[in-house]
Image: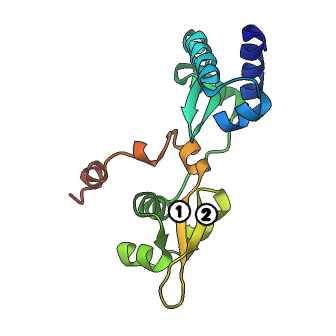
Amino acid sequence: MDAELLKRALEAILLAAGRPVRIKELLEIFPGTSEPELQAVLKDLMATYQERGIRIREVAGGYRLETAPEVAEYVRAYLRPKPRRLSPAALETLALIAYHQPITRAEIEAARGVDSSGPLRLLLEKGFIRVVGRKEVPGRPILYGTTDYFLEFFGLKSLKDLPPIEEIRKLSGRA
């Protein structure tokens, strides 16, 4: 495939997808293209967009076209999105899951000291967490873990990009 056509096709796919697109998916679409070739074209596109109102960013194990931070407020004013806010209880539950996954509801409740069924249900409905299995103990409780949507929402490439837990404890005053 012609390099310029590949570049234009990748750009169009990222625009149409509206979510992170993984290299594995792109290799299926462009069978004669190697992973290093695709990554080189993506890096070239990233450089091209550096001075524009949109960016290509690597998040959640894929590449996504997104609004540049410096123009985000104008896009937000135009779209007037409904704010996506999580309650402090949901954020605390999500943080426990992110840092300690896989984790059971009982382990979450032991750490929080309160019932967590409401926050868990909300986080499941919103797609931030998912059931990842069952713990091999009597009763076989459900294990929870984060989703790719969690990574995408918070702009993380992987869980390794979470801030160190000590930093979170300092911010919350629990150091």
Q: Residues within 10 Å of mark 2 (few under 14, many from 20)?
A: some
Residue at the spot 58% in from the left edge and 72% down from the top edge: 133
As helix, strand or loop, the secondary structure at mark 1 comes to: strand
Q: Residues within 10 Å of mark 1 (few under 14, many from 20)?
A: many
Where, by quadrant of the figure, is residue 117 drawn?
bottom right
Judged left or right of residue 154, residue 22 is right
Across and down, in percent, residue 72 comes to: 58, 25
Callout 1 amino acid: Gly
Q: CA distance from mark 2 to mark 1?
A: 6 Å
Judged left or right of residue 142, residue 163 is left
| Quadrant occupied by the N terminus | top right
Residue at the spot 55% in from the left edge and 36% down from the top edge: 59
Residue that carries the numbered disc 1 in the rendered image: 145
Q: Above or below — where is 85 with respect to 118?
A: above
Across and down, in percent, residue 140 comes to: 54, 85
| Quadrant occupied by the C terminus | bottom left
Q: Seen from this angle, which residue lies furthest left? A: 175
Badge number at residue 130: 2
As helix, strand or loop, the secondary structure at mark 2 comes to: strand
Is residue 46 visible in the rendered image? The answer is yes
Does the residue at mark 2 contact the one at mark 1 (Cβ under 8 Å)? yes
